[in-house]
Amino acid sequence: MSKPKGKYYWTATVGEKGQIVIPKQARDIFDIKPGDTLMLFGDEERGIAIPPKSSLDQIFGTAFDKNE
């Protein structure tokens, strides 16, 4: 079974201090650099999402719609 183009999955282990290491391939694909701040979104039923930085403008635009 081949994976769909542009879709990825990785695993990460949580350390004793609750820290995880983002796999290098993921950091490279999503241009995550040391010192970057990431946002995590959680849903008890669906899990945790860490959106790429490029989508944050869209997320904020939706949350703070100027027409409201």
Image (cartoon, rainbow, N blue to C red):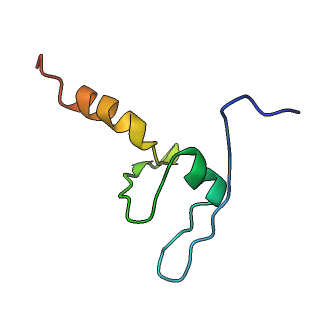
Q: Residue at x 38, y 65 (%)?
A: 35
Which quarter of the image is occupied by the N terminus? top right
Q: Quadrant of residue 66?
A: top left
Q: Residue at x 56, y 78 (%)?
A: 15
Which quarter of the image is occupied by the C terminus? top left
The spot of residue 34 in percent (x, y) is 44, 65
Q: Residue at x 63, y 64 (%)?
A: 12
Above or below, 15 relative to 46: below
Q: Residue at x 56, y 67 (%)?
A: 21
State the residue lying farthest toward the bottom: 16
State the residue lying farthest toward the top: 67
Above or below, 34 relative to 32: below
The spot of residue 28 in percent (x, y) is 59, 51
Left or right: 38 with respect to 1?
left
Q: Quadrant of residue 58?
A: top left
Depth order, front residue of 33/66: 33
Depth order, front residue of 51/53: 53
The total number of labels drawn is 0
Left or right: 5 with respect to 36?
right
The spot of residue 63 in percent (x, y) is 23, 31
State the residue lying farthest toward the right: 1
Above or below, 63 relative to 16: above
The spot of residue 60 in percent (x, y) is 25, 34
